[in-house]
Image: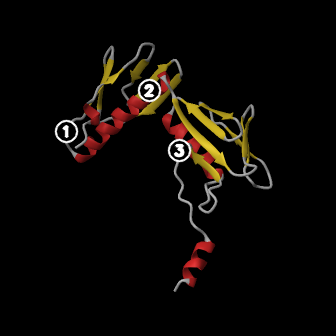
Amino acid sequence: MSRVGYMPIEIPQGVKVEIDDKGEATVSGPKGELSQRLPREITIEVGESEIRVSRPNNEREHRALHGLTRSLLANMVLGVTEGFEKRLEIQGVGYRAEETDAGLTLRLGYSHEVNYEAPEGVQLSAEGDTLIIVRGADKQAVGQVAAEIRGLRPVEPYKGKGIRYLGEHVRIKPGKAAKVGADLGG
């Protein structure tokens, strides 16, 4: 059984947490302001230096919402203080990314350049030609933008060309030549 929901969330200096009677939580800090609607069944107590989340009973739904609510609040607090970051790498001959005012211009082996505009609250940057960095205060938005960029040219399994998360392992298939050699041995 998970005990995530019982852990208190520390409120760092300079972070302000407000929760209204409709269940809307607003967290503001040095990196911006985030708001999220949280389940009304879960009780959230905001103290001077910590946030505590509690559930009304031990029903299955309330146990699930307990941990979820605590995680959402913790991610909001972490986002407005430190922010979140995802790194993507581009592999392939002639594949590259360039920073523009609105977002990124990507050359991914298509007959045209792909322009990707950054949504509000997310910053895109390109280091060198092959590294893309996605930053922002909202963990969900950062992950969504990184996934959308990766989806523009997913890694193909034969040569490994495409956009991948930094450190992502891609299994390369042997291709047709390996099968021909296996057939001759029999």
Residue 87 spot, x, y in % from top left? 57, 38
| C-alpha distance separating marks 1 and 2 | 28 Å
Q: Residue at x 52, y 17 (%)?
A: 30
Q: Secondary structure at mark 3?
A: loop
Which residue in the structure is indicated by mark 3?
Answer: 167
Query: Of callouts 1 and 2, which one flags the residue occurring earlier in the amino acid sequence?
Result: 1
Q: Are marks 2 and 3 in contact (CB under 8 Å)?
A: no
Residue 19 spot, x, y in % from top left? 38, 24
| C-alpha distance separating marks 1 and 3 | 42 Å
Is 185 in front, or is 177?
Answer: 185
Residue 115 spot, x, y in % from top left? 74, 43
Amino acid of disc 2: Leu
Q: Is residue 113 visible?
A: yes
Q: Residue at x 45, y 32 (%)?
A: 36
Which quarter of the rendered picture does the N terminus lie within? Answer: top left
Amino acid of disc 1: Asn
Which residue in the structure is indicated by mark 1?
Answer: 57
Query: Of callouts 2 and 3, which one flags the residue occurring earlier in the amino acid sequence?
Result: 2
Q: Secondary structure at mark 2?
A: helix
| C-alpha distance separating marks 2 and 3 | 23 Å
Is residue 27 placed above or below 41 in the rendered structure?
A: above
Q: Is residue 62 left or right of residue 152?
A: left
Q: Are marks 1 and 2 in contact (CB under 8 Å)?
A: no
The image quadrant that residue 128 belongs to is: top right
Q: Secondary structure at mark 1?
A: loop
Q: Is residue 45 visible?
A: no
